[in-house]
Image (spheres, rainbow, N blue to C red):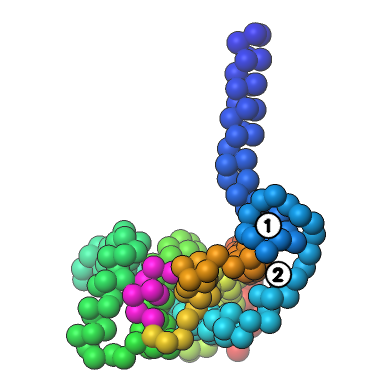
């Protein structure tokens, strides 16, 4: 009994230390974002919302936020669409299937700095000018695609092909089967994949740093501010980025939880 009690106490102490190490820095950052001090750091001198007002009133930061949203949405939609097409293609036996599968997942294995250098050389060789919706968007699609594929592949692989066969037996054409049977059933998984992909794109820094042009995303703008000046509104800006990322991830988890098979027979025309 003493041994079990000691083990429980050790496990409890480990759990406390684990959560402090995991969430402690975030709690300190949240506290500093409300600190009424012109110096970023402790001691805490009082509560204020002026650093959030400063962050939202900064034209450069708001432009970076709009840029991140624009690139994130497009990268998430494009990455999810490509991942869906790949997952549907892998339902059949194709030549070099194993090789293609590993190539799709290659960006996950390559370190970010190596991937950024490779993309920089690749775009330079092709003569693609650096820009938000050229090099940055392509780099983000390359980054989110393997994660989107890993999210969708199990769902598509578990899809009951009998539903498609039943629809075709009832006279539905392939496009109708896709639009009225496959996509409605996969809709929650697709929405979850879009949200997760958006989060990955919104937070991506290393690859963006190598291929960005004059228009900065939020991580690039944040990095520039950290390098140039340790401004007191940086914790508030960090919390804004964190809240957006957490909100997108929570939506993704909600859609994943609701990703279950639906009866599409009433939708077949």
Q: Quadrant of the N terminus?
A: top right
Residue to which mark 1 is pinned: 32
* Picture layout, residue 211 above or below residue 227: below
Image height of 8 relative to 38, above or below:
above
Q: Residue at the spot x=48%, y=89% of the render?
A: 175
Asked whether, in this view, residue 49 is left or right of residue 239, the answer is right
Which label's residue is closer to the chain start, 2 or 1? Answer: 1
Name the element at disc 2.
helix
How far across and down, in percent of the image, does residue 260 sit? 61, 64
Residue at 80% of width from left, 59% of height from top? 47
- Magenta stretch: give its range: 205-212
Neighbour tally class for label 2: few under 14, some 14-19, many 20 plus, Cα within 10 Å: many
Quadrant for residue 7, please give it: top right
Quarter the C terminus occupies: bottom right
**Which residue is most to the front?**
38
Q: Position of residue 28 (x, y in %)?
A: 65, 51
In this picture, is 15 found above or below 125?
above
Q: Which residue is mark 2?
A: 51
């Amino acid at each position: 009994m003493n041994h079990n009690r000691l083990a429980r106490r050790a496990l409890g102490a480990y759990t406390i230390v684990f959560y402090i190490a995991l969430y402690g820095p975030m709690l300190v950052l949240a506290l500093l974002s409300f600190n009424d001090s012109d110096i970023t750091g402790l001691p805490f001198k009082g509560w204020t919302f002026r650093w959030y007002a400063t962050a939202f009133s900064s034209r450069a930061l708001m432009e970076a936020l709009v840029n991140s949203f624009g690139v994130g949405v497009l990268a998430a939609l494009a990455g999810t669409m490509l991942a869906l097409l790949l997952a549907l293609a892998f339902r059949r036996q194709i030549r070099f299937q194993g090789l293609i599968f590993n190539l799709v997942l290659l960006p996950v294995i390559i370190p970010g700095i190596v991937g950024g250098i490779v993309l920089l050389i690749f775009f330079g060789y092709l003569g693609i000018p650096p820009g938000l919706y050229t090099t940055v968007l392509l780099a983000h699609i390359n980054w989110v695609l393997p994660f989107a594929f890993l999210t969708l592949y199990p769902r598509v692989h578990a899809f009951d092909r009998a539903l498609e066969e039943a629809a075709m037996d009832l006279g539905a054409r392939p496009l109708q089967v896709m639009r009225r049977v496959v996509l409605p059933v996969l809709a929650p998984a697709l929405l979850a994949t879009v949200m997760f992909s958006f989060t990955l794109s919104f937070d991506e820094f290393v690859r963006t740093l190598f291929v960005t042009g004059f228009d900065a995303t939020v991580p690039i703008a944040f990095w520039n501010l950290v390098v140039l000046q340790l401004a007191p509104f940086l914790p508030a800006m960090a919390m804004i980025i964190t809240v957006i990322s957490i909100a997108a991830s929570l939506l993704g988890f909600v859609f994943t939880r609701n990703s279950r098979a639906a009866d599409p027979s009433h939708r077949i025309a």
